[in-house]
Amino acid sequence: DEAAKILERLGFTVARKERVLRAQPPAFRLDCSIPEDLVEEIGRIHGYDRVPSTLPGARTPVRDLYEPADADDTARELLAGHQLDEAVTSSLVSGSATPAIALPGASPALVRIKNPMAENRDALRRSLLPGLLEALAFNARQDQGGARLFELGSVFWETAADKLEQPQVLALAAHVPAGGADAAAAELRSLQATLATVRDRFALPTTDFKQAQFPGENPGRFAGFHPGRTGEILDGDEAIGIVGEVHPEVASRLGLPGRAVVAEVLFDRFTDGGQRTPQARPLPRFPGVRRDLTVVVQGKIAGRDLVQVIRQLGGYTLREIHMVSEYQGPPLGAGARSLSFRLQYQADDRTLTNEEVGALQQHIIEGLKAQFGAVVRS
């Protein structure tokens, strides 16, 4: 009764039913929105000194403390650890001004809103990439170039049966204000490695990356991406995402200086297998040996194909392989590309000698020559 009287004196509308007290705050009390606010008001008037001191009672947690985190939270934590900032962009976009850039499986047309609240917000987004690119352009105009963003959210696709699908997708975008093609290629590899880290956290081992094959002058489903600098994300033989450099025309339309690299993947497919439990491994007892390898190849040979062959030829002592750079231009000649890899060799039972590592390196070189016609650069 005393609590009800206190709230009534403060202008609250109070209704009592048995041991339940319902209170409606006055319109001007916007600060009172949860039950704890009512407790604070009663304690303030009643007097905190009159409230007895008691130990809090034990209670069962809402969920198991050892239950693994949701896939969304896990992905956000991983991406934040890779120095990407989370962005939240609008689901409403302009039907006429939105760039035609999206992952290959997206609906070709935007879902229109019959009664839009604004002319420039008359459709639902079919991709997260336009919103992230606009955010990069906005940051660049505020002298905050070089932003690296990610977003995890829903997109809206209209199916042939006039139904609306709302798949959850993960998108990454990075601005490269200076450094040209080399800096963009390095940032692109960084985004690809970040996606691979997210993939490896979930039980989807079949995901791979493959260079996109543009059908000709008409980019088709790769609209908005730079030819030759774009790759598909595959689950088996099915494309579930895309990673690549944004076409200069799209960046120019958005007022984004320099270059931009982006990635977008169907997050639901990325996490179909659940989460993989992290496995602890003992620290190596013997030191490893690091060697660099640079080869020149002709034509459109994908870097991932070279990596797969190197991994097969290196055997169990080849523990790590990273592609560190890619160059195309003089003095290599037309159609030639130089790719550099960093290899880490290590054995569990001994320290590898220079002769052993040299023999493994030569075996890899001979295999690359035989399969791809690669030429080793010294």
Image (spheres, rainbow, N blue to C red):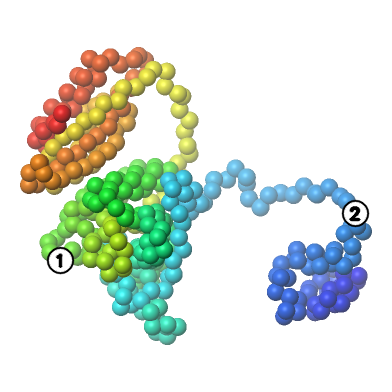
| Figure quadrant of the C terminus | top left
Seen at 43% across and 46% down, the residue is 82
Q: What residue type is labelled 2?
A: Pro
Give the mark nearer the N terminus: 1 vs 2: 2
Element type where label 2 sits in the image: loop
Picture coordinates of residue 352 (x, y %)?
30, 16
Write the residue at 22% across / 15% down: 355
* Residue for point 19% across, 33% down: 294
Question: Could one spot residue 204 in this view of the protein?
Answer: no
Examine the image and state in which quarter residue 133 appears.
bottom left
Residue at which label 2 appears: 52
Residue 264 sits above or below residue 314 on the image: below
**CA neighbours of label 1 inside 10 A, class few (<14), some (14 to 19), many (20+):** few
Q: Name the residue under label 1.
A: 218
Residue 338 vertical position relative to residue 21 in the rendered view, above or below = above
Q: Is mark 1 on a helix, strand or loop?
A: loop
Compare residues 356 and 173 and report the one nearer the observer.
173
